[in-house]
Image: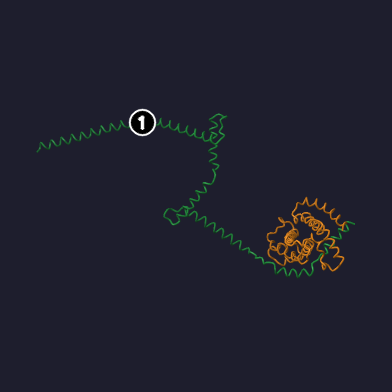
Amino acid sequence: MQNLSELLKKAQEGNKEAFGKIYKFFYKKIYRYCKINIYKSELAEDVCQETFIRAWKSLPSFSINYKGTFQAYLFRIARNLIIDLSRKKKEFSLENVGEIGVENNLEENIDKEAEINNLKKALSKLNEIDRQVIILRYFEEMSHKEVAEVIGINEGALRVKTIRLLKKIKEIIIKL
Amino acid sequence: MKEEQLNDLKKAYLDIKPKGSIEDRWKKLSFLLPQRKKIPASFYRYALILTLIFVFLISAASKAVLAVKPGNPLYPIKKITDNLVKEVSKKIPLSNRENKTVKSKINCCDQQGSPSAKPTTPRDIIKNIEKNINSIIKNNKNKNTNGNKTESKNETSKNNNLKVDKVEDQDKNEEVKGERTIDENDNARKK
């Protein structure tokens, strides 16, 4: 893959091919983030596509100096879309995962399905911001700065929060 | 144990993959993305040149309008601009220069008066200025009175000179009259 900043420059000028490369690079990450936050996989796909459309539209005004990394920028767009969707349709939010149950055709492998079920159950016991911190910091391995940018909180406060959350998630895992 | 379970959760998260190929999704999306219009670099050049020409024309027109005299069709424009300038100048606060003159006058007052009687309120400042103006007017009056005296002297001397001139004129007239009577008498004798 070409240098991301070069691709971004080209995409900002209106080069769709360059944006396609960026899309292919980030699509999986954004999809699983949407998928874990939204219960329905079709909706997750729609949100994912909408994220990239919005990113394309707002790309000319994007600046790494002012808006941080492009990855954080994409995740922030996705998060805002997920929040909007959860306000509109509450039944698709992750808080209701225990009540509705897990989608049958989520994965082919039954073991994997069980693991994902456990993951969703564990995450559903956290509040929205804590869940985002765990997903972005521990699962996506993003930096504190990037996570702070996505969630919109202070970096220092986030560092303190992550230590506390790690203990909390371990306690939740034991109970599962 | 906890760490392993946490790692399992992480693996489960990373195993989430979209159905179908990403390539197909991109093809679908690429049609949905709006085409961005690219502005050519020459556009900015033309825009800059046009703005410069526009500014030049406006400055030239404004200068030409200022020099217009009544009767000219552009005179109403000049009137409007003058009115505008007046209104704007009213809104502008006192300039530093004016403030400086007021301050200098206040300093003068301070130097003349006692140090304890420094003007603090605007009324005091105005009073001091009035006092100064009155003193200046008085000085001027005194000068005028002195000047009047000298002028009166000059006027009396001038009047005297005029009187002398008048007497001389009268004498001349009388002489002329006398000569005329003599001539008339001679003519009568001849007849």
Of all residues, the one furthest to the front in this rendering is A99
Residue B52 picture location, percent across and down: 56, 58
Vertical side of A158 occupied by A27: above or below: below
The answer to which image quadrant residue A113 occupies is: bottom right
Disc 1 marks a residue whose amino acid type is Ser
Which of the two residues, B158 or A35, is positioned nearer the viewer here? A35
* Residue A127 in sight: yes
Q: Residue at x 53, y 38 (%)?
A: B102
Q: Nearer the viewer, residue A158 or B88?
A: A158
Q: Is residue B180 left or right of residue B24?
A: left
Q: Could one spot residue A70 in this view of the protein?
A: no
Residue A127 relative to residue B48: left or right: right
In the image, the chain rendered in orange is: A
Q: In this view of the protein, which residue sits in the foreground, B43 or A78?
A: A78
Q: Chain of mark 1?
A: B
Query: In screen coordinates, is B57 left or right of A175?
Result: left
Neighbour tally class for label 1: few under 14, some 14-19, many 20 plus, Cα within 10 Å = few
Q: Which chain is green?
A: B
Q: Residue furthest right?
A: B1
Q: Residue at x 59, y 61 (%)?
A: B47
Say which of B182 and B118 sits in front.
B118
Looking at the rendered image, the quarter that the N terminus of chain A falls into is bottom right
Q: Residue at x 11, y 37 (%)?
A: B188
Residue position for label 1: B152
Secondary structure at badge 1 equals helix
